Image (cartoon, grey):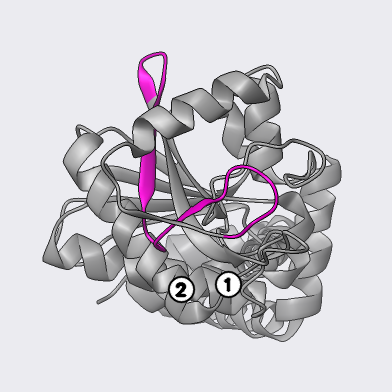
Amino acid sequence: MKLFLKSLLLGFRRRWWTGITRAFAMAGAIWLVTEITMKSFTSVDQFITAHGTEYAVGVVTACVVTFFYHIYETRSVSFRVPTTDSWINIYYDDLLGTDTDWLIGVGEFFDSDLGHVVSSQSLHGKLIEKVWNSDTGRFRKDVDDALKGNPSEVTERSIKPNKKYAIGTTAVLPRAARKIFLVAMAKTDLQSSKASSTVPMLWDALLGALHSIHNFGNGGTISLPLIGNGRSSVNIEPQHLLRLIVLSLIDFGRKTGLPKQVNIVLPEDCFERLDIREIKRDWSHK
């Protein structure tokens, strides 16, 4: 109920005028049909005359329902990637609670030091805690094994790991019957370990990750967050970031191919800053 009211209030702030115009349009349509049928059929005229109150209540109810339908801020949308049979689903939930393959962005060092370098509040940190039970040594070994064969550069970083990988490099890690795709999407300051990214870097990271998913994902459903919105922020508004991610998915899907289902799982704290209906509207008729 709390989430329902939250969606209703946000939608009212954003679309109250649209709701009113659609409600009046509904009233006009009902009136037009009523007038035509009353003139054409005497029985209809007599029925509406005898049940005027019920008729009025029905019209008002239809208008109210129309109003709320058009203002309600939906929590999920789905649309097909144009010219393909893949679907993109966008919704609010906990990514790590989904029973799918996961795509998660990390820094170029694929760090494992939970608490000092990798915040326990980040998705990267929560992943280590949930899947590896905070065993950073085991996580480090699994990542190093997954990265074997990928070109790297040894740096003068004072802490381990000190090898960095190119943006877009992707480590494919097993998770029972699922897979985890960790992609390097941010540069890391050698002194402070602060991660940062840019729009071109994010685009390259997504391209590299999607190639890995295409080659090693076996067509399984993939879920990704609002990648670039976390601690290695791309520093653009969430709505623009979501547009960029969707554009990258669609571009890759048209050229190479995506799994049948791709989920973008959004954090609840971005709800008031995102308009996912707009994203669906942009791509539903292309």
Q: Identify the element where label 2 is drawn.
A: helix
Read off the residue under disc 1: 197
Examine the rendering and report whether any part of residue 73 can be seen: yes
- Locate the C terminus and report the quarter of the image it occupies: bottom left
Which is nearer the eye, 113 or 100? Answer: 113
Instruction: Give the amino acid type for the residue marked by disc 1 in the picture.
Output: Ser
Q: Residue at x 59, y 38 (%)?
A: 95
What distance separates the C-alpha of mark 1 from that of mark 2?
6 Å
Query: Residue 233 at x, y = what percent?
Result: 66, 68
Q: Is residue 276 left or right of residue 243?
A: right
| Numbered badge on residue 201 | 2
Query: Residue 58 at x, y = what percent?
Result: 66, 58
Q: Is residue 42 left or right of residue 234?
A: left
Q: Is residue 48 left or right of residue 113?
A: left
Which is nearer the eye, 129 or 220? Answer: 129
Q: Is residue 161 above or below residue 60?
A: above
Query: Are the residues flagged by discs 1 and 2 in contact, CB closer than 8 Å?
Result: yes
Residue 69 sits inside the magenta stretch: no
Examine the rendering and report whether any part of residue 35 can be seen: no
Residue 162 sits inside the magenta stretch: yes
Q: Is residue 147 above or below residue 176?
A: below
Which is nearer the eye, 61 or 147? Answer: 147
Span colored in magenta: 156-178
Q: Identify the element where label 1 is drawn.
A: loop
Q: Residue at x 39, y 40 (%)?
A: 171
Instruction: Give the amino acid type for the residue marked by disc 2 in the picture.
Output: Met
- Locate the N terminus and report the quarter of the image it occupies: top right
